[in-house]
């Protein structure tokens, strides 16, 4: 006799998978636009902080040293 809790979990996961696969997710970023943004940032020597707030360089670097460290 199957475990009712496992059967319920399996049914829930099947329903969740069906919901995910039946609704198409639109692309979040147009790849050409993303490349243009990165190239423009490199050209201007500007790099924005990552959205998760992670430090990419030491905070005590001077502006001139920080520019060498960019893309």
Image: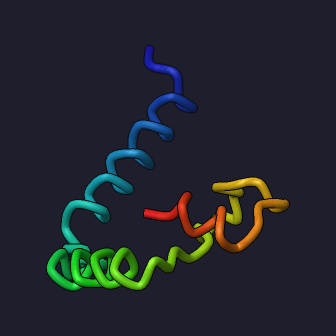
Residue lying at the far right of the rendered structure: 60
- Which residue is painted at 54% across and 61% down in the image? 68
Q: Position of residue 40 (x, y in %)?
A: 32, 84
Decide if residue 45 is on the left or right side of residue 58: left
- Which residue is painted at 45% across and 33% down in the image? 7
Where residue 61 sits, quadrant-wise, is bottom right
Q: Nearer the viewer, residue 21 or 54?
A: 54
- Which residue is painted at 38% across and 56% down in the image? 16
Where residue 67 sits, quadrant-wise, is bottom right
Residue 48 against residue 17 in the figure, above or below: below
Decide if residue 48 is on the left or right side of residue 58: left
Q: Nearer the viewer, residue 19 or 11?
A: 19
Where residue 21 sits, quadrant-wise, is bottom left
Residue lying at the far front of the rendered structure: 64
Residue lying at the far top of the rendered structure: 1
- Which residue is painted at 50% across and 28% down in the image? 6
Q: Nearer the viewer, residue 59 or 10?
A: 59
Q: Position of residue 17 (x, y in %)?
A: 31, 52
Q: Quadrant of the N terminus?
A: top left
Q: Position of residue 29 (x, y in %)?
A: 28, 79
Q: Position of residue 23 (x, y in %)?
A: 23, 73
Number of marks in the rendered image: 0
């Amino acid at each position: 006799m199957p475990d009712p809790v496992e059967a319920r979990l399996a049914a829930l996961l099947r329903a969740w998978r069906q919901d995910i696969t039946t609704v198409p997710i639109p692309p979040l970023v147009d790849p050409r636009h993303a490349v243009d943004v990165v190239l423009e940032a490199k050209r201007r020597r500007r790099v924005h902080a990552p959205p998760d707030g992670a430090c990419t360089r030491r905070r005590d670097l001077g502006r001139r040293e920080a520019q060498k460290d960019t893309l």
